[in-house]
Amino acid sequence: MLSVFILLGNSLLDSGLASSLVRSRMTGQKDYSTVFIFNLIGGVTVYGILCLSAPFIADFYRQPLLIDIIKVYGLTFIVNSFFSIQNTLLIKDMRFKQLALTQIPAVTIGGCLGIFLATRDYGVWSLVWMNLSASIITTLIHWCQSSWRPKLIFDKKSFHKHFYFGYKMTLTGLLDTVYKNLYTIIIGRFYAVIQLGYYARADSLSQLPIGIIATAINKVAYPMFSSFSQDDEKLKKAYKMLMQQVLYWNAPSLILLAIIAKPLIVLLITDKWLPVVPYFQILCIAGIMYPLHSYNLNILKVKGQSGQILKLEIIKKVLMVIGIVCVFPFGIMGLLYFQIFFTVFAYYINSIYSGKLINYPLIEQVKDIYPILLLSGLLGLVVFYCDQLVFAHLSNILRIILSGITYGGLYLVFSQLFKLSPLADFKQIILKK
């Protein structure tokens, strides 16, 4: 219930200034210190706004407990503002190994604390303390590992330069956050709490392959694109390769998850969560195209087109709201099916504008990705019928393993047979040729 408000606060806290620092070639102490001070003031301000809004949020969801949770959970805004610059420097220098080594201990320790508190019947508070402790540990590690320290410098010229680019990205981020969590708000407000639980669980499980594959590559994509933003040919080549790689691994992963949804849900979280299955399957299909949106927007970002990004997001979100109003009478399933349509539509809109900047039109992009979608979809149908007709009587774990091996084996064999370029590119990356 609070996720949308937490994410909105994070969007306001960043204000897009970090993205501006990453794309700027000439940055120094005055830039970093200026943004640090702004973020710190912003963290305190956002926390204050959230605390003042707590009673209204609790009334909206009819959950009085949310007031106390907000006051504690919201402290993460202040804590996170202390390491934003150190984190930005690692991303700008593409030091992702060090970034991972910073995040892993915090996530591990915070996760262990959350599990410990959950076993001691702390309920939802175990999640609150898990996230707050992870933020504190992340901050401490960043300050111990980084040599950068802020100074009492607030340069107006530097602030205006980064804020002019950043505020448009902030508004874009706010719109995107509202869109991603609009379903949570609607379901939480107009349906039973248990329905929100089913949706949230389905959404989090469907995001796993997206988070593992797309998010990892996306962290590399933006600073890499920024490094040769003036060379359209290189930018096009890099974008094409990343787009194909992400889709090549993401599409079959999500289709396979949709096929084995029932045995997977029963195995992981028991049969009392079986109502999650249809939600999960639809969200998996909807998630296939979603990672490509961010790569299109990255092209616009590195070209300094933050205003264009904002215009696109406004257009998409207005149309999305109209669509949700139209499908709302069809219930949760209508809302979920609309997500599939909208992800395809959003990719269409984004790719038109980004393609113009690097001479990579939509029709050419579609030609580069349709073999992957066609192959993964057709093989998905084959494995689905195998699962229903041959594997259905087996145990859940054996059913999952056989479906996975069958799909994965067929996918790699036919990829080699039809000489799909993403597989060849992946081999070159692994072999460092």
Image: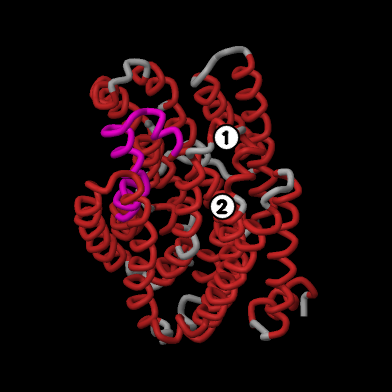
- Give the numbered dot on residue 211: 2
Compared with 119, 38 (above or below) is below
Q: Is residue 374 left or right of residue 156?
A: right
Give coordinates of residue 47: x percent, y percent.
35, 28
Label 2 sits on what residue type? Gly
Q: Measure how far apart labels 1 and 2 are at the Cα level.
A: 22 Å
Name the residue located 53 percent from the left edge and 26 percent from the top edge.
127
Q: In this view, does 139 lie to the left or right of 319?
A: right
Q: Which of marks 1 and 2 is nearer the N terminus?
A: 1
For the residue pair 150 and 316, the one nearer the viewer reads as 316
Q: Can residue 53 be seen at all in this image of the molecule?
A: yes
**Callout 1 crowding tier (Cα within 10 Å): few <14, some 14–19, many ≥20:** many
Residue 53 picture quarter: top left
Q: What secondary structure is marked by label 1?
A: helix
For the residue pair 261 and 186, the one nearer the viewer reads as 261
- Give the numbered dot on residue 64: none
Q: In this view, does 280 lie to the left or right of 359?
A: right
Compared with 127, 199 (above or below) is below
Task: Quadrant for the C terminus, please.
Answer: bottom right
Q: What secondary structure is marked by label 2?
A: helix
**Callout 2 crowding tier (Cα within 10 Å): few <14, some 14–19, many ≥20:** some
Q: Tell me the residue that label 1 is attached to.
A: 139
* Magenta span includes 370: no
Question: What span is in magenta?
Answer: 172-198
